[in-house]
Amino acid sequence: MVEEGIQERLDQFLARRLGFSRSRCVGLIKDGHVTLDNRDAKKSETVEVGQVVAVKVPPPAPLQALAQAIPLDIVFEDEHLLVINKPPGLVVHPAPGHPDGTLVNALLHHVKDLSGIGGKLRPGIVHRLDRDTSGLLVVAKGDEAHIALSNAIRRREVRRVYRAVAWGRIPESPMTVDQPVGRDPRDRKKMAVVEGGRRALTRLRVREQWAAAQYLDVSLGTGRTHQIRVHLSHLGHPVVGDSVYGANWSKGMSGPNRPWAQELERRAPRQLLHASNLRFFHPATGNEMRFVAEIPPDMAEVVQWARGDEAGYTGQR
C-alpha cells in the first residue's frame, strides 16, 4: 500500500521502492506484472496514498553472452589485446537488467576468441568501468595476456587516470585518499567507506577550480568497485551527475553560487567521470603502452560551459 503523501508516477514509484532501474520497472508494467488497485496498471499513472500496488517479478531468464554488431571505438589492437574507448551508457558485460547490448556482446562480434578466465559472461574483461563512466579499457584476447594484465593491476603497475567534475573544493591539491571501501551496511546495493573494507587508494589533483565545482585529475592506486565515486562522496565532493552518491547536491547550497550550481547539475547528462589515460606494459613484448582519450562530447560541453560562464569560472584553464 502506498503510504507517502505525494503523488508520483508509477514507474518512478516502483524504481524508488524496489531499487530497480526505471527501464526495468517500465518493462514490468508493460508485460502486465504490475497491478494498481487490482487492475492492470499503466506506466504514466500516478499513485496516491491508500492505493494498492502489487508487483509480480518474474524469475530472470538465464544469461548468456551472444555476439552483436555494436560499433566499437578501438584505440589499439594486436593478437594479444585490445584497448577500447568505451562510450557513456554502455554496460561492460551482461547482468540482470542488461542481458545484451553490452561491450562483451560487441567484442564477441569483433573478436573470434577472447580470454575465458572471466567466465562466459565476462570473456576478456580484465577491469571494468561503470555504465555511465566513459573512457579507456584494456581487453585480453588470450588467457596468458589476461593473467599478465590482471597481475599487473594487482601489483599496481597499471596506471589509470580519470577526469572528473566534482562538487565544491577539495581541501588540498594534490591529495591522497586512503580509506577502505566495502558494501554499505545501510544499502547493500551501494558501496561506502566502511571499517573493515578493502584498502582503497585514490589520488586527486585539481586541474581547474570553478565557483561551486572543480575539474580533477584522479589516479587509482587500487581498483575497488565505485572507488572514485565513493571516495569523492565521502569527502563531501561527489561527482557531478552521480545519481547514486551525489544526487541533488546543489539543493543543499545557499548563497550566490547556487543558481550556477543548479544550472551545472541540470546540464550534466550523467556522472561526469572519464578514464582518460591508461599505461601498462605489454604482456607479450614488455613494451610500455600509453593511451590517451579526450573527454567525450557530452562531458566536454559541460566543461566548456563551466569555463565560459564568467560567474562560474575562477581557476586556470
Image: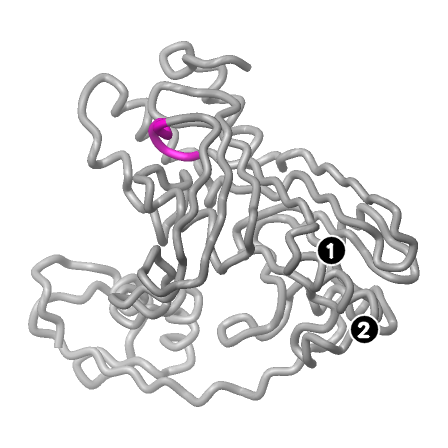
Q: Is residue 96 visible?
A: yes
Secondary element under disc 2, as helix, strand or loop, is helix
Query: In x, y percent, where is residue 276?
Result: 65, 39
**Residue range (magenta):** 166-171
Left or right placement of residue 127 versus residue 78 in this view: left
Q: Quadrant of residue 107?
A: bottom right
Residue at (57, 41) in percent of width and height: 219
Seen in the picture, residue 271 relative to 196 is either above or below; the reply is above
- For the residue pair 31 and 101, the one nearer the viewer reads as 101
Seen in the picture, residue 11 relative to 131 is either above or below; the reply is below
Query: Is 90 a magenta residue?
Result: no
Query: In x, y percent, where is residue 117?
Result: 72, 77
- For the residue pair 136 and 68, the one nearer the viewer reads as 136
Left or right placement of residue 225 versus residue 88 in this view: left
Query: Is 170 a magenta residue?
Result: yes
Assess disc 1: are there few (<14), some (14-19) or many (≥20) residues with their C-alpha within 10 Å of its C-alpha.
many
- Measured Cα–Cα span from mark 2 to mark 1: 14 Å
Secondary element under disc 1, as helix, strand or loop, is strand
Left or right placement of residue 220 versus residue 41 in this view: right
The amino acid on which the numbered mark 2 sits, given as a three-letter code, is Asp
* Tag 2 residue: 143
The amino acid on which the numbered mark 1 sits, given as a three-letter code, is Val
Residue at (49, 17) in percent of width and height: 307
Q: Quadrant of residue 17?
A: bottom left
First-in-chain label (2 vs 1): 1
Residue at (74, 60) in percent of width and height: 149
